[in-house]
Amino acid sequence: MQILLAEDDQAVSLITSLSLEKIGGHQVTVVEDGEAAVDLATRQAFDLIILDGMMPKKSGLQAAQEIRGAGLITTPIIFLSAKSDERDIREFLELGVGYIAKPFEPTQICSHIDEILARTGFKT
């Protein structure tokens, strides 16, 4: 699976991308801010987009709104965020198919993603 990971924390992006590649066998492209995520998602096809909730230049929510507003991009979006109140989670789920709370166990990220995608009808 081709995954776009937008995460500004270098340690989190490294651990997450390595887990997705080594455990899940996925190909991961990493960007460090929401603006770069929008730019790449609208120019290249991905099977999944993972957005950090809080990033520089554009938040994950802003990036998702722009990606969805760009046309026919229906790629599933999963949010990673330390934000955990109900309002924040509801906003994430209005634009994406899932939410994974930070901190999370890196070795479990693939199974979390598989569960979310299966539950929402997307194939992995």
Image: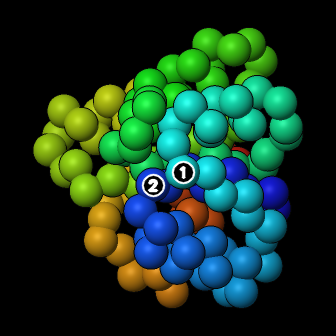
**N-terminal-most mark, 2 or 1:** 2
* Residue 120 can be seen in this image: no
The disc at residue 17 is: none
User: Which of the 4 image quarters holds residue 62?
Assistant: top left
Residue 53 location, quadrant? top left
Residue 27 location, quadrant: bottom right
Quadrant housing the C terminus: bottom right
Q: Is residue 96 left or right of residue 26?
A: left
| Residue for badge 1 | 32
Whether residue 40 is visible, yes or no, is: yes
* The furthest residue to the right: 44
Classify residue 108 as left or right of residue 100. Answer: right
* Residue under the image location 52 percent in, 79 percent down: 15
Q: Is residue 56 above or below residue 119?
A: above
Left or right: 4 as drawn, with respect to 55: right
| Residue 32 picture location, percent across and down | 54, 51
Q: Which residue is mark 2?
A: 8
**Residue 110: x percent and y percent?**
59, 74
Mark 2 and mark 1: Cα distance apart in space: 4 Å
Identify the residue at horizontal 73%, vertical 64% (top origin).
Answer: 28
- Under circle 2, the secondary element is loop
